[in-house]
Image (cartoon, rainbow, N blue to C red):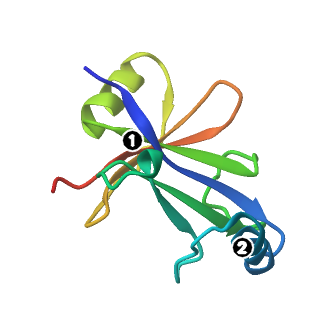
Amino acid sequence: MKRVVGIGGVFFKAKDPKVLGAWYREHLGFDLSEWGGAVFDANGASTDAKTAWSLFPADSTYFAPSTQPFMINYRVDDLHALLVALRAEGCYVDAKVDESEYGKFGWVMDPEGNRVELWEPPKT
């Protein structure tokens, strides 16, 4: 079974997401969407392999139980099978799984307390 097949997104906390987002827009050319983040095509090409970049308020609990100010989202082919394998390997896997039109999301903690988001994109 393939496990991680790419990076789906990079998320981090900011004291003032609007101000920091504006800095990234002005100085690095990020094309920020209404939801406050940007989506990049893989290697600048138009493919299904997109990578999201997003800021979260400093007091966000979305990364909990991690206390780190960032979280990486990795693309996977089969979220449910991977979560089963990770549990069998003794990893701390969040019981919650989200499924929506944006795909399937699950979470695991690495040994240093970083929350890792696993994302199976919707089938197109």
Q: Residue furthest left?
A: 124
- The circle drawn on residue 21 is 2
- Amino acid type for the residue under numbered disc 2: Gly
Query: For residue 78, which quarter of the picture?
Result: top left
Q: Is residue 123 left or right of residue 4?
A: left
User: Are the two marked residues, 1 and 2, in contact with CB atoms closer than 8 angstroms?
Assistant: no
- Amino acid type for the residue under numbered disc 1: Arg
Residue 29 rendering spot, x and y as whole percentages: 66, 68
Residue 57 rendering spot, x and y as whole percentages: 73, 70
- What residue is rendered at 65% in x and 24% in y? 111
* Number of marks: 2
User: Which residue is more in the foreground, 39 or 111?
Assistant: 39
Residue 22 rendering spot, x and y as whole percentages: 74, 78
Q: CA distance from mark 1 to mark 2?
A: 24 Å
- The circle drawn on residue 75 is 1
Query: For residue 79, which quarter of the picture?
Result: top left
Mark 1 closeness class: few <14, some 14–19, many ≥20 residues within 10 Å: many
Foreground mark, 1 or 2, reads: 2
- What residue is rendered at 41% in x and 46% in y? 106
